[in-house]
Image (tube, helix red, strand yellow):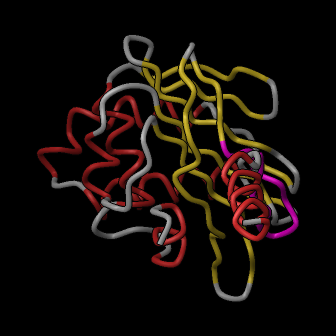
Amino acid sequence: MRGIVRYSFICLLLYTWPARASVDIAGLSLPTTYKLAGHSLVLNGAGIRSKFFFKIYVGALYLDKATHDPQQALDAPGAKSMQMLMLYKQVDAEKVADGWRAGFEANLSRAELAPLTTRLQQFNALFPTLHKGDHVYMDYVPGAGTRLTINKEHRGAIAGEDFFHALLQVWIGKQPADTGLKSGLLGD
């Protein structure tokens, strides 16, 4: 009987043990939840964007409900956040803009890209040169669009859910910038 009580106590203790508040990746601690416009989002997944032998940034995707399915992540209604924590010493604004353009072109048809071109140019204009330690927040808030914040400085917003949907495809679309990062963002 005493063994059963001890076993029950251990099970109860493990069951009520608090969930992890953060996940460590590349020496950075990422919170498992993110508050955005009154919503509590969960860390869907995270990974490292590498190019050649260089680690460029840690990417983190926060959604209302976790999923391994890229289409469900893209189509999920409500607030979402894609974040980049810079690892590389410096990425020029021009390189950042080139990356967005290439990502949009790789994942969208010409017909899909056409109505987004002006907004993509506006988005690119919001980016300064990024440095190691910078934290880039691309937060989608329904009705407000994609808000860009770097460190704690609000840089601007781009209208339309279609824009954030296209932006998210840079990472989890059919032609992602980094397949390893895509897997990480989808919790695989």
**In the picture shown, does residue 74 fall above or below 108?**
above
Tally the numbered discs: 0
At 63% from the left and 52% from the top, the residue drawn is: 94
Quarter of the image holding residue 41? top right
In reply to whether residue 61 is colored magenta, the answer given is no
Q: Residue furthest front?
A: 1
Which quadrant does the N terminus fall into?
A: bottom right
Residue in front for this viewpoint, 53 or 17:
17
**In the picture shown, does residue 151 fall above or below 48?**
above
Q: Is residue 106 left or right of residue 14?
A: left
**In the picture shown, does residue 73 fall above or below 149?**
below
**Magenta portion: prevailing SS class:** strand
Image location (x, y in percent) of residue 164 = 39, 36
At 76% from the left and 55% from the top, the residue drawn is: 9
At 76% from the left and 45% from the top, the residue drawn is: 18
Quarter of the image holding residue 88? bottom right
Residue in front for this viewpoint, 140 or 43:
43
Q: Is residue 172 left or right of residue 59?
A: left
In reply to whether residue 26 is colored magenta, the answer given is yes
Image location (x, y in percent) of residue 149 = 69, 28
Q: Residue furthest bottom?
A: 53
The residue range painted magenta reads 21-32
